[in-house]
Image (cartoon, helix red, strand yellow):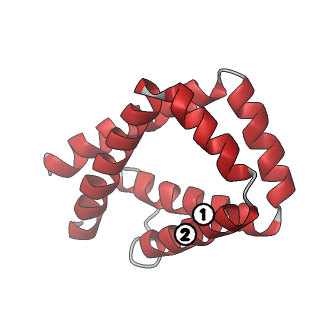
């Protein structure tokens, strides 16, 4: 459980901070993301880092329970699959990302990550 609490605290802080930045400065972030997907080197690097973060979460914490720690495992899988997608299917991910930025999906995802981050902070600091 100690590993779950640690990951909840770190990932919760990360999600709250970054999603707040995404929500407050969404125009700046949209522009930066559009520039990033056009740079194949940056896109490959971000995919590699996403795979790394996913593995860093999943190897010590592959927990499937009917409680809040399963969220850590799911987030690890999201990072891993997102990174693999960027490395092996970059054109598809780029088209999906551009489509997401043109619609309201960007703000919706930012709010979802923010709420997940708040929940993880609550779980991590009240255990």
Secondary structure of residue under mark 2: helix
Q: Nearer the viewer, residue 13 or 60?
A: 13
Q: CA distance from mark 1 to mark 2?
A: 5 Å
- Residue in view at x 65 percent, y 27 percent: 105
Most distant residue in the left direction: 126
Q: Position of residue 109 (x, y in %)?
A: 56, 33
Q: Mark 2 = which residue?
A: 49
- What residue lies at 78% left-to-right and 48% top-to-bottom? 94
Label 1: state its secondary structure. Answer: helix
What count of labels does the image hold? 2
Image quadrant in which the N terminus is located = bottom left
Q: Position of residue 51 (x, y in %)?
A: 58, 71
Q: Is residue 41 above or below residue 97?
A: below
Q: Residue at x 66, y 51 (%)?
A: 36
Quadrant assignment, res 24: top left
Q: Tags 1 and 2 in contact by the CB under 8 Å rule?
A: yes
Q: Residue furthest bottom?
A: 59
Residue ID at (22%, 40%): 122
């Amino acid at each position: 459980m100690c590993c779950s609490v640690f990951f909840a605290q770190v990932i919760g802080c990360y999600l709250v901070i970054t999603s707040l930045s995404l929500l407050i400065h969404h125009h700046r972030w949209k522009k930066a993301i559009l520039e990033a997907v056009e740079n194949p080197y940056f896109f490959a690097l971000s995919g590699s880092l996403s795979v790394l973060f996913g593995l860093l979460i999943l190897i010590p914490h592959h927990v499937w329970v009917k409680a809040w720690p399963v969220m850590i495992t799911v987030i690890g899988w999201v990072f891993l699959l997102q990174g693999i997608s960027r490395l092996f299917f970059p054109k598809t991910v780029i088209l999906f990302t551009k489509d997401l930025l043109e619609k309201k999906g960007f703000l919706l995802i930012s709010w979802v990550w923010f709420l997940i981050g708040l929940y993880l902070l609550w779980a991590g600091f009240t255990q």
